[in-house]
Amino acid sequence: MPQQYDVASLGNAIVDIIASVDDRFLLTHRIAKGTMTLIDEFRAKELLRALADNQQTMSSLHQVAGGSAANTMAGLASLGGNGLFLGKVSDDRLGKVFGDSMAAAGVTFHNGSSKTGASTASSMIAVTPDGQRSMNTFLGACREMVPDDVDEEQVAAARLLYIEGYLWDEESAKQASRKAIAAVKGAGGRIALSLSDPFCVGRFREEFLHLLDKDVSVLFANEEEAKALFQVQDFDGVIAGAKKWGGIAALTRSAKGCVIVEEGMVHEIPAAPVSQVIDTTGAGDQYAAGFLYGLTHGKGLADCGRLGALAAAEVISHYGARPETSLKDLAAKAGLI
């Protein structure tokens, strides 16, 4: 089968709705500042109306497809890669926003074949003048992914499958992920897993370890996630655990850069320079984008890490979890592609 895609990915399909507000707005609408709060559909609609009224017109709101794996696919496309994203949205206005946003980013979006009763997932992101982002997230339809939503022939046309750990929170999404894994492995492709967050690792550590043993050859984790996975207290223990595992571990350490481990080889890559850190949202997603682009385009692991660092530096220099400057141009200027 011809490899049509560099990377196929499964993840939660969420529309980010971003608006500038003041602290009084947060108090009036009982929004916890600087945190992420899970909300129900009624609360999501209530906050959307409030944000729209606050902005005078709906067009003032910045609405863009989001979710960890979807953001990574947008970064991959910005580098010139060819990506496929499988997620779940409803047949509603925000579902169309999500699809149109992914198309504009140059990513193929597959919404599956089954119908969903819930509305498209959304995250209301209120940004105050001090740069704090207060997120209220309704997970909605993205939690309803089922195995029938995975087109085996389509995902098998990818060199690599990238899965976010958050999918393990729903049994049906977990089974959809396993179906995609089997299809890609059967076609000779590789499997990559992002651990998503330390609490996710806490919930599914044994299952993630089983995946690493049987299916996954590329692991993405920040320092705290990796400590939770290998149950160690320091980064030296993380390195030892990654070496023992033997796959490719791409480990991010914020301002300390990243460390890439493959069996006995360890590559330490410094963080790419950035004039001012504005918003760290999406840094891990874009690091994965750069790394995966390099991995699927014949780059050595050190250059994969440098591409990841470059992509992460771009996204933390502005608000939002997706690149605003062509990553392909930045990588070319840096001599990485």
Image (cartoon, helix red, strand yellow):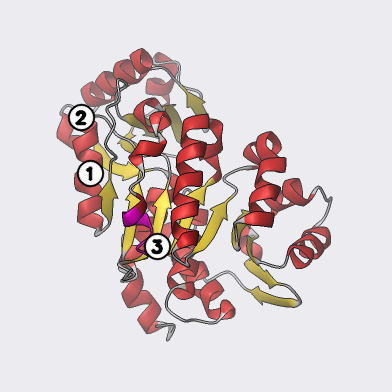
Q: Are marks 1 and 2 in contact (CB under 8 Å)?
A: no
* Picture layout, residue 116 above or below residue 9: above
Q: Which residues are magenta?
A: 153-158
Question: Which residue is nearer to you in this view: 93 or 150?
Answer: 150
Q: Residue at x 57, y 45 (%)?
A: 196
Residue 247: x and y, percent? 66, 66
Residue 325: x and y, percent? 31, 65
Q: Which residue position is annotated with label 3?
A: 7
Question: Which residue is nearer to you in this view: 80 or 52?
Answer: 80
Left or right, 244 with reference to 129: right
- Circle on res. 99: 1
Upstream in the sequence, badge 1 or badge 2? 2
Upstream in the sequence, badge 3 or badge 1? 3
Q: Residue at x 47, y 66 (%)?
A: 189
- As helix, strand or loop, the secondary structure at mark 3 comes to strand
Please tell me how crowded label 1 is: few (under 14), some (14-19), or many (20+) other residues with Cα within 10 Å: many
User: Disc 3 residue type?
Assistant: Val
- As helix, strand or loop, the secondary structure at mark 2 comes to loop
The quadrant the C terminus occupies is: bottom left
Q: Residue furthest bottom?
A: 335
Upstream in the sequence, badge 2 or badge 3? 3
Displayed quadrant of residue 74: bottom left
* Picture layout, residue 93 above or below residue 297: above
Q: Residue at x 42, y 47 (%)?
A: 10
